[in-house]
């Protein structure tokens, strides 16, 4: 694997897929994007593949084709869009763990989910800019996490590593970091405070601890 993402595949050509595609193109990264009716060959051949489809449709993803790929899960459980899905709201499992369980062999990293598509495009800043904000990155595969952190940096955000896929729960919808324009230090503090929130207590209780 190269140390830097040079080609990026995107599954889902909607609001967030197009925003990530625009940012990546701006960063000089070759992009292949596919909607639900498009061929995915170029997408799955890329250095990493962003999942930007409605989470409720994750079972329509080409699981076999994604085996071995670094997969960036940018999806959220959004009940207005996905409908009531208790399986996606289970405090024992982060949604990225659910996605990873459906994608055997994929190296799933959660990232690019907690800012809106609009914010992603508008708030990107070069490294060192005082207005630069943070994007959290979580996963179980350290090498894949480092690769995705490099991508986040290239797209215009300070990457904040946020633990395992299970801990990715700390920047799902409804958390303090979700939708926040936070710099690196603020983002770390928000992630840490998660356990003192109502949702954090529910999650810790359901899991028998953190
Ligand atoms: N909107 C945001 O600001 C934002 C920000 C961060 C994260 N997210 C998350 O990103 C995901 C996408 O949100 P969105 O707002 O971009 O949705 P969207 O605008 O509705 O776009 C979703 C796209 O995914 C396509 N799609 C569905 N199943 C597919 C498949 N199996 N393979 C390839 N493409 C497929 C759809 O194509 P068809 O129309 O042909 O079905 C559509 O183009 C959601 O999980 C959302 O929670 C959204």
Image (spheres, helix red, strand yellow):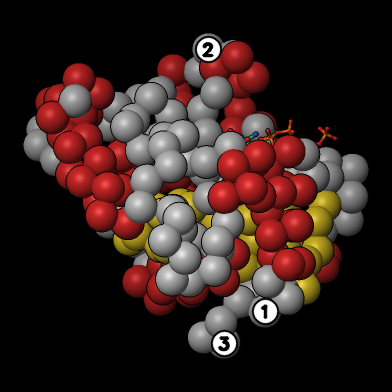
Label for residue 6?
Answer: 1
Name the side, left or right, on which 83 lies relative to 92: right
Asked if marks 3 and 1 touch (Cβ < 8 Å), the reply is yes
Q: Nearer the viewer, mark 3 or mark 1?
A: 1
Label 3 vs label 1: CA separation?
8 Å
Q: Is 69 situated above or below 39? A: below
Q: Which residue does the image show at 66% across and 39% down from the upper left?
A: 118
Asked if marks 2 and 3 touch (Cβ < 8 Å), the reply is no
Dot 3: element: loop
Label 1 vs label 2: CA separation?
38 Å
Q: Nearer the viewer, residue 89 or 147?
A: 147
Label for residue 2?
Answer: 3
Residue 186 drawn at (x, y percent): 27, 47
Q: Which residue does the image show at 46% across and 34% down from the upper left?
A: 179
Q: Residues within 10 Å of mark 3 (few under 14, many from 20)?
A: few
Q: Residue lying farthest left?
A: 209
Q: Which residue is mark 2?
A: 84
Q: Nearer the viewer, residue 128 or 157?
A: 128
Residue 7 drawn at (x, y percent): 71, 74
């Amino acid at each position: 694997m190269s140390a830097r993402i040079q080609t990026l595949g995107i599954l889902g050509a909607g609001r967030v897929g197009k925003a990530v595609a625009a940012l990546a193109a701006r960063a000089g990264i070759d992009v292949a994007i596919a909607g639900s009716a498009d061929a995915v060959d170029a997408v799955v051949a890329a250095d990493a593949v962003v999942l930007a489809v409605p989470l409720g449709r994750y079972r329509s993803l080409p699981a076999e084709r994604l085996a071995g790929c670094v997969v960036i899960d940018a999806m959220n459980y959004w009940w207005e869009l996905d409908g009531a899905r208790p399986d996606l709201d289970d405090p024992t499992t982060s949604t990225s763990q659910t996605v990873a369980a459906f994608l055997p062999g994929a190296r799933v990293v959660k990232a690019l989910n907690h800012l809106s598509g609009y914010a992603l495009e508008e708030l990107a800043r070069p490294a060192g800019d005082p207005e630069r904000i943070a994007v959290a990155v979580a996963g179980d595969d350290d090498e894949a996490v480092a690769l995705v952190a490099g991508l986040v940096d290239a797209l215009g955000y300070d990457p904040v590593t946020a633990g395992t896929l299970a801990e990715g729960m700390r920047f799902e919808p409804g958390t303090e970091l979700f939708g926040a324009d936070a710099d690196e230090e603020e983002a770390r503090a928000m992630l840490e405070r998660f356990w003192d929130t109502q949702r954090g207590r529910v999650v810790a209780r359901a899991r028998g601890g953190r």
